[in-house]
Amino acid sequence: MQFRELTDSYQLQKILRSTRFGTVLRGTSLQSGQTVAAKLITAGPSPGLVAGAPDFEKLAAILAGLRHPNLPAVLDSGFTADGSAFFVFELLEGKSLDLLSGLPPARVLKIVGQALSGVEVLAAKGAAHLNLSPDNLFVATTAAGEQVKLLGLGTAIFRPRGTAAVSGVAAENARFLAPELTSGAAGATGALADWRADLFSLALTACSALGATVGLGNSPVVQMPLSVSFELESDEALRQVLERCLRQQPAERATPREFREALLQALGDPAGLQMPVPAVVSPPSRPAPPPPSQPPAPAPSISTAFEAPAPMPPMEPAVPFPAATLADYFRRLDFSLGARQVAGLREFAARASAAGAVPPLGPDGPVFFTSAP
């Protein structure tokens, strides 16, 4: 184990995140000029830096040999003279899952599916994350769309073992730890914890992001909100696999393949789980028109381009009111308008009648009304 000074290789510029378990700083490589994120992991007295160093170096070697879309690229690693372990990662832009509220269920499942891919890759290499929680699922913005990155790597190596493990994580994240990580069964080395602990944490993270009600115990119960169930193709398959992943005994939990199949059934779109969601969807370009095989026909002249409008149909003759109705109208005018106004109306009607505009006006209306009230 060799000790190094980060400032010999990197110009550290800004603290991005700091807790009592570690610090993440923004920096620049003095050799390449690349902008990086340096993570310093605080090694407590138990198990201590020396005891955890072999596991950390093994994980660092695995990550350095991987270039997986759901794992951050490790550029450097080692130990500092002040007793910390460190990783140097690519700098990512985006937000962690705990800061993305109100996501559609389909998007949540796609995020969980990408995180599951990272867990599977680590498991295939004989490693485990053991620190999964919503704030360690980072939704990075890339040119290809959203890519979920598993952050928090390496922290679990220097976390206290057994029942003291809860004190080694933030209070809001302690509930996402698998039971074997917080019980004395794991012993001083935590040898019983593997990828099955990651499935427990990932299942509980999915439940939290979906707003599901969870009852833990020997027979876990997961209840989805109705709004989530209505939007999923098969919420029953998802509910069953989440309950299996949340069982207390690691041997009783679902496998990564079963977890993935349930996600696919819930989405109803096998391709949607594996492909990143495009950050920006550009409209398809309009294809160019094919070259004309012959000269275009001349445009029609104005006289031939438009047809003459069709004549309007004749109007139906008006149906006259009954005499009693019109006579009653004039009588009502006597009460509503007054004698002067009625006299003026009668004079106007008389002049119109004399001019031939309306039939002659009698005392109760036009003379073509023959009946009287």
Image (cartoon, helix red, strand yellow):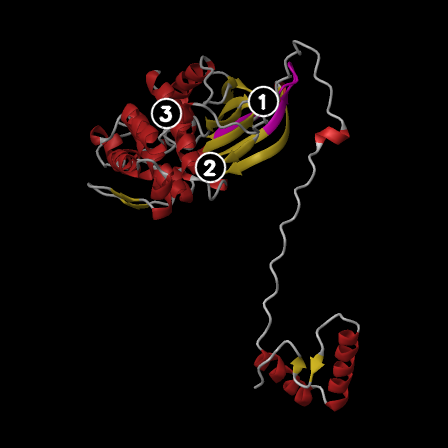
Q: Quadrant of the C terminus?
A: bottom right
Query: The residue tagged with tag 1: helix, strand or loop?
Result: helix
**Which label sits in the foreground, 3 or 1?**
3
Whichever of labels 2 and 3 marks the residue nearer the N terminus, that label is 2
Return the residue at label 2.
97
Return the residue at label 1.
6
For disc 3, the neighbor class at 10 Å (few under 14, some 14 to 19, many from 20) is some
Callout 1, which amino acid? Leu
Return the residue at label 3.
270
State the residue in front, 174 or 324.
324
Q: Which residues are magenta?
A: 26-41
Query: The residue tagged with tag 3: helix, strand or loop?
Result: helix
Name above or below for residue 342 compared with residue 46.
below
Task: Name which residue lies at 54% across and 31% down.
Answer: 24
Spatial CA span between label 2 and label 1 = 29 Å
**Could you tell me if the residues under marks 2 and 1 are in contact, i.e. CB atoms within 8 Å?**
no
**Could you tell me if the residues under marks 2 and 3 are in contact, i.e. CB atoms within 8 Å?**
no
